[in-house]
Image: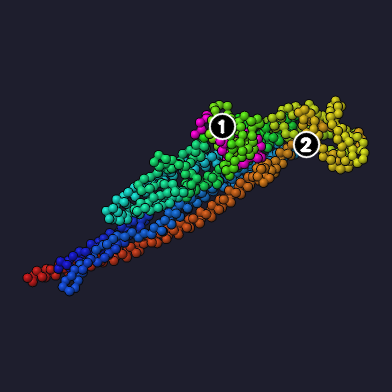
Amino acid sequence: MSNLLSIGVSGLSASQTALNTVGQNITNADTAGYSRQLTVQTNNAGMKTGTYFVGTGTTIADVRRVYSAYLTTQMQTSTALDADAQTYLAQTNQVNSLLSDSTTGLSKVLQNFFASVQTASSSPTDAASRQLVLTQAENLTQRFNSVSTQLNAQSDYVNAQMESISKQVNTLASSVASYNQAISDATGSGSVPNDLLDKRDQAVTELSNLVGVTVVQQDNNYNLYLGTGQQLVVGNNVAKLEAIPNPNDPTQDILKLTSNSASIDVTSVVTGGQLGGLLRYRSDILQPTQNEVGRMAIVLADSINTQLEQGIDLDGQFGTSLFKDVNDPSVVSQRSLASGLNAGTSNLNVSIDDSSALTISDYKVTFTSDTDYSVTRLSDGKNLGSGNLSDDPATSFDGFSISKQDIGNIAQGDTFTVIPTRTGSSNIAVSMSDSNDLAFATPVSGTTTTSNYGSGTITAPALTTDLSNSDGAALKASIQANLPVKLVFGAASGGTQGYTVYDASGNSLSVGSIIPGQENNLSLTIGSPSFSFTTTINGSPGSGDSFTFSFNENGAADNRNAQNIVSLQTAKTVGKNAGGGMSITGAYSSLTETVGAKTNQADLDAKATSAVLTQATNSRDSLSGVNLDEEAANLVKFQQYYTASSQIIKAAQQTFDTLISSL
C-alpha cells in the first residue's frame, strides 16, 4: 500500500509543479523579455520485487526555460539597428522640414531680397523701392538668424540626449553586472535561475536600444563591449560612460568611457542604438548644415558689401556696407575654439580673406612653436600647410587666415579648432539704416562729345579695381581726384586709329589704338594709386572725336551697380575652389536636395530595420513567448492530472482501510 501511496503523492507533486509553471507562464504572458517555461518530467527508478520491477512514481527533472541564444542575439542586434535608424530619421526630418518649408527656410526670403533689388534698380531714385530693399534685407538676416537658432537648439538637444542616455546606459550596465553575479551564485549551487536569465537578457535588449553592444558569454557571465571592443561590462565589473563637452569644441559633447581610472574617447566608434543615431545625425546632417548655412550667410554679406563699395549712393558718395562686416571684431574672435588642454592662455582671430574659397569643413590648428603652426582640414584630414603668426600678410587657407588675439600667450603644442563658417548665420545683420546709402550707381560715367561727327560709340564704363581692400580709401580719393579724363582720337591710318588720354588739365596720360569698325575692348589705368576701368569702342570715330570719363557723383538715375547686385543671385560665389562653385541660391537648393535625399534614404532604412526587428521579435516570441491558448490547454491537462493523482492516493487509502478491516 505504501508503494501505491508514494506513486500517487509523486504524481500529485509533479502535477502541482506543472500547474505552478503554467500559472507562471500565464501571469507573465505580457512581461517583457519573459521566456516561457516547461516542466521536464521523468519516472522514478523501479523497485525490484522478485523477478520483476515495480514502478515507484514520477519526479520533475527540470523546469526548463524555452530559449534560443541565436534568436535573442538577433533580436538585440535588430533592436540596436532600428533604434539607430529611427533616431536618425526623427532628427533628420526636423532639419529637412526646417530647410524645405517656405515659412522657415531661406529660399523664399532670398528670392524676395533679390527681387526687391531688381525693383529698386528699375527706379533707383524711388525712396519706397530703396526702403523695401532694407526691409527685405532685414527679413533675410532674421531668417538666417532663426535657422541658426534652431540648428543650435538641435545641437543642444543632441548634447542633452547624449548625457541622459549615457546615464541610462550606466544603470543598465550595472544591472547586467549584478545579474552576472546573482546568476553565478545561483548556478554555483546547481540550480538554473530562469527568471534571472530572462531579466539579464531583457536588460541587454534595453541597453541595445540605447547603444549597440556586443555580447560575449563567458561561463555564466555576459561580457558587453562597445564599438571596436571597448569593455563596458566584464563579469561584475562595470565601466562608466559619460557625455562631456569636447575639450576641442565645448559646443559638442563627446563620449568618454572610464574603467579603472583610465578614460578613452569612444565617440568615433560608438554605433547602434539611440546614441549611434544621434552621433550619425550630428556628423552627417547637423554639422554640415550649420556650416553650409553659415557659409552662405558669409558669402551673401561679403559679396553684396563688396559690390556696394564699388558704387555711388544718392548723395554722390562711395557705397557702404549693407550687412555687418564679415570681419567685424566681434565676429573674428568667435571662429576659433581653444583646446581645454592648452598650456597657453590666448586664442585666435580668424579673418575671411576670400569668402568664395570657403569650405564647410572645420580645421585643426596645431602650434609647433609659439608662432609657427600647421593647419589640417578635418573633413578629409588633409594638411593644408603651415604659417607663422608674424607673417604680414597672414597665410590664407581655404579663404581664411588666422592671427593671435591681443590677450594671453600661445605655447608650443597648443591646438585650436577653427570654425570659419559655423557662426556665419547667427552673426549676419543689417548695418545700414538709410536707404539713400544704397550705392546703385557706378563711380565712372562716360559721355560722348556733342561735336563728334564719326560713328564711334562707347559703352558705359565699368570700374575693375576692387575698392574693398586695404587701399580702398586711397583708391576712392584717387578716383575723385583724377577724373575726368578725355580720350581723343586721331586720324585712322593703315587699318588702325590712335587715341590719347588727357587729364582735366590737358596733360597727356597715355596713348593707344583701336581698329575702326570693330568692337574694341579698352582698359584704362590712371591715377596714383592707380585704378582701372573698362569700356568698349564701336564704330569708327572721326579724327578729333572724343569721349569723356567722369566721376559719377550726379548719377542718381544710374542703376548699373544695382544690376551688378542682382546678378549676384546667379553668380558662382560659393565654393569656387570646388568644381567652379555655385550661386547662393544654387548652394541652398543643393543643401536642401542633399538633406532631402538623406531624409528619404533614412526613411527607407528605418522601414527596413523596423521590419527586420519585427521579424526577429516574432521569431523569438514564436519560440519563447507565451501562447495563452496552449497554456489554457495545459492548465486543464494538469488539473486532470492532479485529480487523477489524488484518486490514486484515495484508492491506496481505501485498500489499506479494507485490509485493516479484514484483520
The location of residue 506, given as percent across then percent down, is 87, 27
Against 578, residue 402 (above or below) is above
Q: Residue at x 50, y 51 (%)?
A: 85
Against 283, residue 509 (above or below) is above
Drawn side of residue 562 relative to residue 364, left or right: right
The location of residue 503, given as percent across then percent down, is 84, 28
Residues marked 2 and 1 touching at CB (< 8 Å): no
Which quadrant holds the N terminus? bottom left
> Can you identify the residue that label 2 sits on?
462
Crowdedness of circle 2 by 10 Å Cα count: few (<14), some, many (20+)?
many
* Chain part drawn in magenta: 341-366
> Can you identify the residue that label 1 sits on?
369
Q: Is residue 182 magenta?
A: no
Q: Residue at x 11, y 70 (%)?
A: 658
Mark 2 or mark 1: which is in front?
A: 1
Residue 20's label in the rendered image is none
Drawn side of residue 34 relative to residue 87, left or right: left
Which quadrant holds the C terminus? bottom left
Q: Residue at x 88, y 34 (%)?
A: 499
Which sits earlier in the primary sequence, circle 2 or circle 1?
A: 1
Q: Is residue 352 magenta?
A: yes
Q: The residue tagged with tag 1: helix, strand or loop?
A: loop
Against 435, residue 227 (above or below) is below
Q: Would residue 506 be seen by someone viewing this image from the given angle?
A: yes
Colour style of the rendered protein structure: rainbow
